[in-house]
Structure formats: C-alpha cells, structure tokens
Image (cartoon, rainbow, N blue to C red):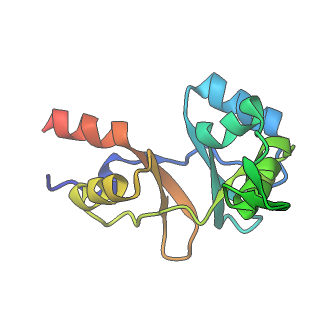
Amino acid sequence: MSKTVADVMSSDPIVVRPETPLKEAIRILAEKRISGLPVIDDAGKLVGIISETDLMWQETGVTPPAYIMFLDSVIYLQNPGAYERDLHKALGQTVGEVMSKNPVTISPDKSLKEAAKIIQEHKVHRLPVLDSTGKVIGILTRGDIIRAMAAE
C-alpha cells in the first residue's frame, strides 16, 4: 500500500462544536449514515470526537455502581469516578458533555499502512486528519482503508 491518508480520507468532514445540542448531532449521524463526528472549537481545532458509542449512554442510562456492605462499610465494586463520568455522559445535553476527549489523530502524509496500524492498536473506527496547525482537514475510517486495499 503506497497510498497516503490524504489520498483516501474524506475531505471537509462534517464537524460539530461542543455547544451543539445532542439532538442535532444525533440527527446528523442518522441522516448522513456516519458513526462519528469530529468536535472543533471556534478556531477549527479538534477538541474531541462524538460517536455512536458516546450516544449509547443517552439511551441506556447508567446503572448505579454495584457495592457491598461489609462490617458497616460500603465497598464499591467499581470505580466511583468512572460512575460519575458515565452518569455525566448519560445526562448530557450538548456534544461537549458526552464527546470523547483527546481522540487519536493522524496527519495527511502518513501511509495507509500506518493508519491501519493506529486504528487497530487503539481500537477506533475513525481517525480525524489534522494539518500542521491542528485543524481538522479530513477523516479516515476503517471503511476508507478497506476500500483502498480493494482498489489496489
């Protein structure tokens, strides 16, 4: 595979902002049949990504952490910090409240082989493509890589 990320990525991806209402993000994902959106700030810089996985919290809600009583002490079986975060995701109303922060990214000059390796290692479905200033210029999905491989 000699192609680069720039050869295969979708340019000008649809993006949302942290203040975008969740309902709007859900509508975009459904209408465009995509599974995730880069989240950018006013300068066009990536601040997160919102995916179907983040939105599943909205539907499923959160079950309280399991705990046991032992000699009058409450022992949590899960990390209460994780529970707080999950609760916030379940109750959030804007993209910024439920998005995943610090997403894995890639630059346009990287090879598709490198991109595939990053996607596999990080178990992600998409990589926002950033220029040298940190602006989102594209998005690369697993499907893009598979289609490029099939075309060769």
Question: Residue at 66% of width from left, 48% of height from top?
Answer: 15
Question: Residue at 68% of width from left, 61% of height from top?
Answer: 79
Question: Picture quarter containing residue 48?
Answer: bottom right
Screen quadrant of the C terminus: top left
Name the spot of residue 89 as percent of width and height, x first: 77, 48
Residue at the front extreme of this rendering: 71
Name the spot of residue 104 as percent of width and height, x first: 48, 62
Instruction: Between residue 50 and residue 14, name the one nearer to us.
Output: 50
Question: Residue at 55% of width from left, 35% of height from top?
Answer: 35
Residue 95 shows in the view: no
For residue 67, side relative to residue 21 (left or right): left
Question: Picture quarter containing residue 32?
Answer: top right
Q: Please determine whether, in this image, residue 16 is positioned above or below residue 29.
A: below
Name the spot of residue 116 as percent of width and height, x first: 28, 53
For residue 15, side relative to residue 105 (left or right): right
Instruction: Between residue 149 and residue 78, name the one nearer to us.
Output: 78
Q: How many labels does the image show?
A: 0
Question: Residue at 26% of width from left, 34% of height from top?
Answer: 147
Name the spot of residue 43 as percent of width and height, x first: 72, 69
